[in-house]
Image: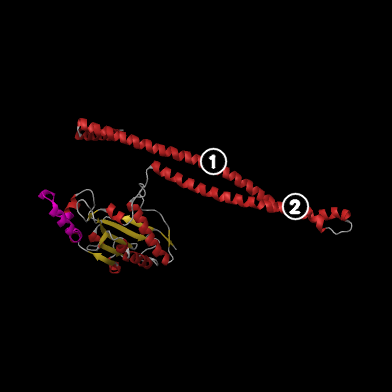
Amino acid sequence: MEQSISFKIGKGSIAHNARDFTASNVDSNRSQYNIEYVNKDLKQTYHELFDDAVTKYNARQTRSDRTIPNYYEKIRMGKQEKVFHEVIVQVGNMDTMNCLGKNGELGKVILDEYMKGFQERNPNLYVFSAHLHMDEQTPHLHIDFIPFTTGSKRGLETRVSLKQALKSQGFNGGSRSETEWNQWVNAEKMEVAKIMNKYEVKWVNLDTHNKPLDVLNFKKEKRKEEISKLDHEILTLKKQYNSLQNMTPYLNDAFNALNNEELWLLPEPNKLTLASTYHKNIVQPKFSKLRAFIQPLINQVFDIVKELINLKTQLIFLKNENTELKNSIDELSYENRELRRDMNKLKKFFGKDTIENALTFKIVKSKRKEIHK
């Protein structure tokens, strides 16, 4: 059996997750089959995690306006970090893993086993609320956690930070598509896949968590995939070609053996008389059979060579196109920086409000023209 793995960012409705109220998509008769792993008060959890660090920080301050009266409110009102994060984990979909279907209980077992190892795997993601729902279409987990880092030399020793929390767990990030978050999500999906394998369920990787690329980046990624595929095909054809070339000495030996057969297989008497008959009745039929066997191999070699030439031509074309796409992206990035620089200059010269009002007026004017057409 094959199933996908969904790992999405949730809205973080803790009351809904805990079933403090019943939404329209919930079958309350089946809520008894839900599992509640943890359900702690969010503000109280903040006190438990950060009060010691806040007290130490405040004690070092010489000005009262730099102290932190309430760390929860500081994060809630700030823009750098979210108060908490939620992920929704699901195996399959409403058609393949429906709660009322034959696979519903299997989905519950897989997710339950995954959840039981979540906190141990993720020591820097403090789970204060986690629920497995069986009263909707498909079994799924809501995991709400506070990401934190410890041992900070500036500010609070223990503080909220998703990036640093994931870094502490070994996810250092890289390119735009290989951020700390994406690396962590892939690692967690692998954990779900391991559990699925135990129950003979194969993971079909759909990469649902990745954000869509812009058009140029999308084309660039597709070109990379095509080039990688062509490289693989070329390698396979080269192996076949080399294999057929290795057969050449053996085929030559076979030809020589057939050509010399009359010299050592002919009976001693009447050699000259029998040579022609023997060659016609024995050697030639064997030679024809061998030629019939070899000819397709020869044709196959020529076909492989032609295919190699075609593939190399395609590869060169795709690599050139890939370079052009990269250059286009660089040019657009440069133009974008230039436009931003010009906009900032205009804002400084005319004032931010003046520029924004002008842009708004231009948009409204354009919409009015469209309506009157």
Task: Name the element at disc 2.
Answer: helix
For label 1, count other residues whose C-alpha is less than 10 Å away and answer few (under 14), some (14-19) or many (20+).
few
**Of 342 and 65, the residue lying toward us:** 65
Disc 1 marks which amino acid?
A: Thr
What residue is pinned by disc 2?
256
Task: Name the element at disc 1.
Answer: helix
Q: State left or right for residue 155 relative to residue 132.
A: left
Query: In the picture shown, does residue 94 fall above or below 238?
Result: below
Please report the residue visible at 13 percent of the width from the left and 49 percent of the height from the top.
Answer: 66
Q: CA distance from mark 2 to mark 1?
A: 39 Å
Q: Quadrant of residue 264?
A: bottom right
Answer whether residue 327 is magenta in the image. no
Residue 90 coordinates in the image, percent (x, y): 35, 60
Q: Which mark is residue 313?
A: 1
Task: Specify the principal SS of the magenta part.
Answer: helix
Residue 223 coordinates in the image, percent (x, y): 45, 44
For label 2, count other residues whose C-alpha is less than 10 Å away and answer few (under 14), some (14-19) or many (20+).
few
Residue 331 coordinates in the image, percent (x, y): 37, 35
**Quarter of the C terminus within the rendering:** top left
Q: Contact, CB < 8 Å: mark 2 with mark 1?
A: no
Query: In the picture shown, does residue 15 fall above or below 32?
Result: above
Answer whether residue 63 is magenta in the image. yes
Span shown in magenta: 45-72
**Quarter of the N terminus within the rendering:** bottom left
Q: Earlier in the sequence, mark 2 or mark 1?
A: 2
Query: In the picture shown, does residue 206 fall above or below 114?
Result: above
